[in-house]
């Protein structure tokens, strides 16, 4: 089986130590986590982990099965990139002088559909949401001018198909 990028969604109670146990499941199989995001979900008092990994479907099924054995985990799902809508977010901090002295910087910002978040005397901050490749492309365009700071979030995603988690939770009530 060939390796593909999978997005794993884990719905769980918000308990201390779960993240460590989940990452241990990947560690045991020598599978690198490419991206990890944890947030509130659409369900009150339920957290959602979004984990991105590059592996085979056989291994991702095995991982999801192991994750679901954790006491706090309500349900875990996996999807391919084609089955999800996903984005990452990035912030770029750049010297303010470039915004005014380098006309090309303004063109890069406009062409990339980025947003200027703040401007101060010493720096300005740009926000970009999009696919990883779009953020990497913007990074490569800014790099020759000098990037003071850069940070990128983990993937956030929703499935294209309806996820049955809400109905599943209602059946427990």
Image (cartoon, rainbow, N blue to C red):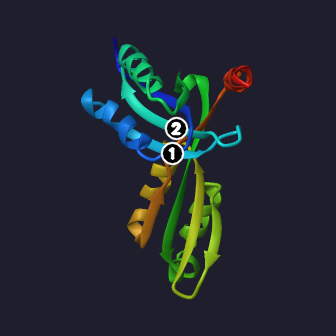
Residues tagged 1 and 2 counted as in contact (Cβ below 8 A): yes
- Residue 61: quarter of image: top left
Q: Earlier in the sequence, mark 1 or mark 2?
A: 1
Task: Tell me if 3 is positioned left or right of 158 in this view.
Answer: left
Which residue is labeled 2 in the image?
Answer: 50
Q: Residue 63 placed where, x, y %?
A: 39, 23
Residue at 33 percent of width and 11 percent of height: 1
Q: Is residue 35 above or below residue 53?
A: below
Q: Secondary structure at mark 2?
A: strand
Count neighbours of disc 2 (C-alpha within 10 A) and say few if under 14, some if 14 to 19, many if 20 or more.
many
Count neighbours of disc 1 (C-alpha within 10 A) and say few if under 14, some if 14 to 19, many if 20 or more.
some
Q: Residue 73 placed where, x, y %?
A: 52, 30
- Residue 53: quarter of image: top left
Task: Tell me if 141 is positioned left or right of 44 in this view.
Answer: left
Q: Residue furthest front?
A: 173
Which residue is labeled 1 in the image?
Answer: 37
Q: Residue 101 placed where, x, y %?
A: 54, 81
Residue at 56 percent of width and 88 percent of height: 121
């Amino acid at each position: 089986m060939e390796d593909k990028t999978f997005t794993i969604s884990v719905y769980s109670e918000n308990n201390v130590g779960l993240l460590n146990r989940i990452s241990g499941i990947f560690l045991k199989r020598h599978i690198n986590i490419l991206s990890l995001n944890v947030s509130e979900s659409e369900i009150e008092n339920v957290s959602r982990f979004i984990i991105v990994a590059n592996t085979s479907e056989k291994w991702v099924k095995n991982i999801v099965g192991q994750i679901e054995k954790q006491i706090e985990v309500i349900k875990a799902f996996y999807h391919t990139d084609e089955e999800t809508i996903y984005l990452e977010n990035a912030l770029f901090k750049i010297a303010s002088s470039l915004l005014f002295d380098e006309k090309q910087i303004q063109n890069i910002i406009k062409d990339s559909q980025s947003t200027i978040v703040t401007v101060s005397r010493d720096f300005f901050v740009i926000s970009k949401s999009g696919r990883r490749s779009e953020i990497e492309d913007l990074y490569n365009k800014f790099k020759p001018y000098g990037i003071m700071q850069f940070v990128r979030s983990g993937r956030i995603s929703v499935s294209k198909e309806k996820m049955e988690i809400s109905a599943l939770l209602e059946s427990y009530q």
